[in-house]
Image (spheres, rainbow, N blue to C red):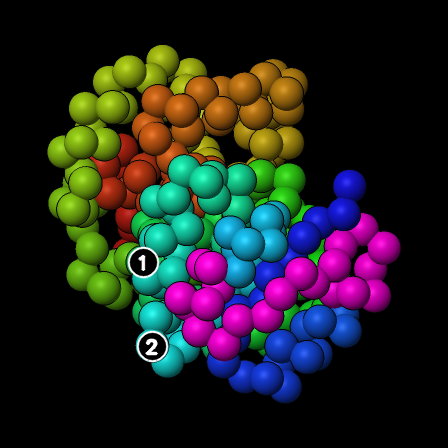
Amino acid sequence: MTIRVLLADDQTLLRSAFRVLVDSEPDMKVVGEAADGAEAVALARAEKADVVLMDIRMPGTDGLAATRMISADPELAGVRVVMLTTFEVDEYVVQSLRAGASGFLGKGAEPEELLNAIRIAAAGEALLSPVATKGLIATFLAQGGSAGEGPDAAAYSQRLAALTVREREVLVLVAGGHSNDEIAERLVVSPLTVKTHVNRAMAKLGARDRAQLVVIAYESGLVRPRVE
């Protein structure tokens, strides 16, 4: 299956570079380019994109607003958004994940990292390595976020009651930035079993993907950030 990629960035030169890179891969192709968020949403719908590489800062409708629109549209439920940031972690990372992005990638990433990110997002996984998760937590704290005091904390806390003991245990490990294989090793179960628990937790908590699980884990107060 060919992964249909949409590029959303107000820098024409950067979009051109991304297009050349993506179109060089046999399993993916660029189906459109957008210079602002509103255009990105329209093209995502018109071109049936699988993955949108979305710049956060764009004139007019920015990447955050566009991601919220995509996440809220039932017709675009299968679209995955990867936020492009100037730095690996910036002040908008938490908002990006809350808005429904599947993860984020620094604009200075290596070509293979970008291509891998597209494939990961298309597969429904999240772009949250342990390093990225630590950065996310640091950003959450820097913004004044407190565990259990997010805008949806009360709702998330109620939903947490529906999780089984094992699902909560898995969620805590996901929030720590551990992969399914690492969690499986810790809990002495198969990676497939871990994936099942993760998927069930996502369904019960109303999370689009693994990335949002991390935000929920902290905003609900299930996991408490440690300031080092």
- Element type at mark 1: helix
Q: Are marks 1 and 2 in contact (CB under 8 Å)?
A: no
Q: Secondary structure at mark 2?
A: loop
Q: Quadrant of residue 161?
A: top left
The circle on residue 95 is 1
* Amino acid type of the residue that numbered disc 2 sits on in the rendered structure: Gly
Where residue 14 sits, quadrant-wise, is bottom right
Q: Which residues are magenta?
A: 22-42
Residue sitting at x 77%, y 73%: 20
The residue identified by callout 2 is 60
Counting from the top left corner in percent of width and height, residue 119 is at 69, 49
Does 202 sit above or below residue 115? above
Residue visible at 64% across and 20% down in the picture: 192
Of the 4 image quadrants, the one containing the C terminus is bottom left
Q: Eyeballing the image, is 129 above or below 113?
A: above
27 w.r.t. 109: above or below: above
Q: Is residue 37 magenta?
A: yes
Residue 137: in sight, yes or no? no
Identity, as a three-letter code, of the amino acid under mark 1: Gln
Query: What is the quadrant of the N terminus in the image?
Result: top right
In the image, 59 versus 125, the foreground residue is 59
Going from N to C along the chain, the mark reached first, 1 or 2, is 2
In the displayed structure image, the side of residue 184 where residue 22 appears, left or right: right
* Residue 9 x %, y %: 52, 75
* Residue 99 visible: yes
Q: Is residue 201 left or right of residue 196?
A: left
